[in-house]
Amino acid sequence: MMKVKITNVDKNQPKNLPEGWKRVRLGDYINIETGLRPKGGAISSGIPSVGGEHISENGSIIFHKYNEKYIPFDFFFKMKKGHARLFDILINKDGANTGKVGLLRHLPFKYTAINEHVFIIRAKKGLHQIFLFYWLFSRLGQEQIKPLISGSAQAGLSYSSIYNLFLNLPPLPEQQKIAEILETVDNVIEKTDKIIEKYKRIKQGLMQDLLTKGIDENGNIRNPKTHKFKNSPLGKIPEEWEVVRLGEVAELERGKFQHRPRNDPKL
């Protein structure tokens, strides 16, 4: 059985907390487990296997054709731990992105596993799962996590380091309200990001048309069906256009660096 070192000394114990709040050791309110993969690593099909590379900067889990990894079905069903559930909190436990936190808001697959490079964190009674995610993701949580990352060859988090984090815990109804507010903000951000991405795609298409077809005297983009185009080294262009070398119509200048002694008062 794995032994977990328990430390109950909280050096950051606040002097004043809101009424009803308490300072608690995280290990008393969570369960942690990790996953694994078979020898040889991931394969190209089977059960989706989620790792640290799937945790985005905004705390979401992104699993798509560019980063998808899988493990065999029979291996998954033999695993005693590492079976992902909806709203599981994942934290990267080793490697360059140690400490990065994500929430499994969506499970598009019937079964999903996690690999050996992440922990699953699940709240127990008295701690709201979504509230816990936002705390771990926040500056308050990260300021406790970062100093715990240790290891000379490869940075990493241990079970005991996470268990020994401390958090200010409101009553459960207040935790739920806080989580709802932050989720509402996240939903607005997500919708805004989608709108921005949509207009980025529109802009790219518009730039392509304007820079290859131009606009006519009426301010409309030229159409090959109504305007004349000709062949050029760059493809079809309006008949009125010409192809020139950039050096014929533009000048290129380089900046200069002047070395100064360190004691120069102008520095």
Image (cartoon, rainbow, N blue to C red):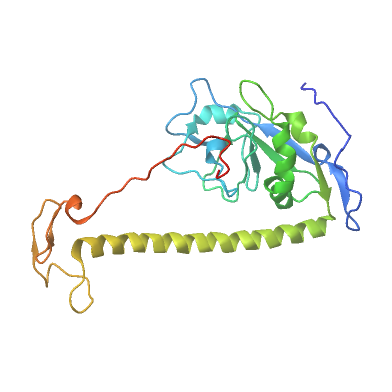
| Percent position of residue 43, x then y | 45, 29
Tell me what residue is drawn at x 90 percent, y 56 percent.
Answer: 20
| Percent position of residue 128, x then y | 76, 51
77 left or right of 7 in image:
left
The reply to whether residue 145 is in sight is yes
Frontmost residue, 160 versus 222: 222
Tell me what residue is drawn at x 20 percent, y 61 percent.
Answer: 212
The reply to whether residue 51 is in sight is no
Frontmost residue, 162 versus 123: 162
Question: In which image quadrant can residue 166 be found?
Answer: top right
Tell me what residue is drawn at x 87 percent, y 38 percent.
Answer: 11
Tell me what residue is drawn at x 57 percent, y 50 percent.
Answer: 106
Query: If the image is split into quadrants, where does the C terminus sit?
Result: top right
Is 58 rendered above or below residue 77? below
Query: If the image is split into quadrants, where does the N terminus sit?
Result: top right
| Percent position of residue 242, x then y | 11, 60
Frontmost residue, 51 versus 10: 10
Question: In which image quadrant can residue 238 be found?
Answer: bottom left
Q: Residue furthest bottom?
A: 218
Question: In which image quadrant can residue 90 be found?
Answer: top right
Is 11 rendered above or below residue 222? above
| Percent position of residue 198, x then y | 41, 62
